[in-house]
């Protein structure tokens, strides 16, 4: 009986430590923590609003460019820095390397893997948008995901799935420059709205200097991602 009691005590202690570690990684905002007064879901909508308005000309969009430039659009001097990823059907995907500057004191938001569906891409109401956005994440096999900051992994990534509110966005003009134009079914470019679903990480402001951020994800048959960012905080 004593042996069982000790074993149970060790198991409970280890379980408590694992839960505490999952909830207190000091480098990132916790899933239920506000990021400068907004939720992860709210910021995911802001992230998409920024990237959806960028025209895709000759695969120069941040979702497509493969050279080592930052390729994150002309981001305004906002309070949160956004990073993007390039999706691939190739498995394993090629690693995309980007070199970016980040303002001192700025949180960094990026999706490990995500999806959005707008009323340009599907016909129906808000519920249809939510269903479409969530579809890749309702498979029997969850995404395989990894995130590492300065060589140290960030764990418990399954806790960081968030759905956005329905949000309006500005589509590029002409509409064929819309990144997802090949899957549009509607020309409702005068009042487009969208919903996002997926896994997101918001890193708390980093110290001034050089940092490395890598993240990868795979949903077999749908998308593969492999990103490496060299970040200079200044």
Image (tube, helix red, strand yellow):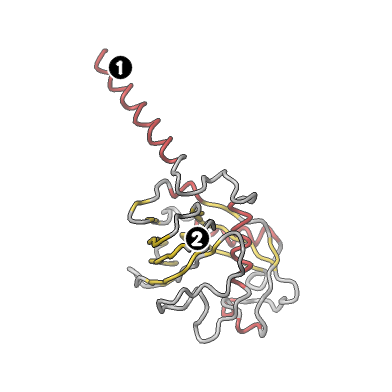
Name the quadrant of the N terminus.
top left
Q: Which residue is mark 2?
A: 111
Query: Where does residue 142 sit, x and y in percent of width and height?
Result: 43, 53
Residue 216 visible in the displayed image? no
Residue 101 visible in the displayed image? yes
**Residue drawn at the location 68% of the way across and 69% of the way down:** 169
Left or right: where 19 falls relative to 126: left
Of tags 1 and 2, the one toward the viewer is 2
Q: Residues within 10 Å of mark 2 (few under 14, many from 20)?
A: many
Query: Where does residue 103 sit, x and y in percent of width and height?
Result: 52, 63
Left or right: where 231 falls relative to 46: left
> Which of 143/57 is in front?
57
Q: Which residue is mark 1?
A: 5
Q: Secondary structure at mark 1?
A: helix
Give the numbered dot on residue 50: none
**Closer to the N terminus: mark 1 or mark 2?**
1
Q: Residues within 10 Å of mark 1 (few under 14, many from 20)?
A: few
């Amino acid at each position: 009986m004593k042996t069982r009691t000790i074993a149970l005590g060790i198991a409970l202690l280890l379980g408590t430590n694992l839960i505490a570690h999952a909830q207190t990684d000091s480098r990132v905002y916790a899933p239920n923590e506000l990021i400068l007064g907004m939720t992860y879901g709210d910021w995911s909508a802001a992230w998409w609003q920024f990237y959806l308005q960028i025209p895709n000309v000759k695969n120069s969009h941040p979702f497509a460019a493969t050279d080592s430039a930052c390729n994150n659009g002309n981001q305004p001097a906002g309070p949160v820095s956004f990073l993007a990823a390039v999706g691939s059907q190739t498995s394993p995907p090629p690693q995309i390397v980007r070199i970016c500057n980040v303002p001192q004191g700025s949180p960094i938001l990026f999706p490990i893997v995500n999806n959005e569906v707008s009323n340009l891409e599907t016909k129906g109401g808000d519920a249809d948008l939510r269903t479409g956005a969530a579809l890749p994440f309702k498979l029997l096999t969850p995404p395989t995901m990894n995130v590492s900051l300065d060589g140290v992994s960030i764990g418990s990534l399954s806790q960081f799935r968030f759905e956005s509110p329905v949000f309006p966005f500005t589509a590029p003009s002409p509409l064929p420059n819309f990144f997802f134009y090949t899957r549009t079914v509607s020309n409702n470019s005068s009042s487009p709205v969208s919903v996002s679903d997926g896994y997101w990480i918001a890193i708390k402001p980093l110290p001034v200097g050089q940092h490395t951020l890598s993240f990868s994800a795979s949903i077999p048959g749908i998308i593969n991602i492999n990103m490496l960012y060299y970040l200079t905080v200044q």
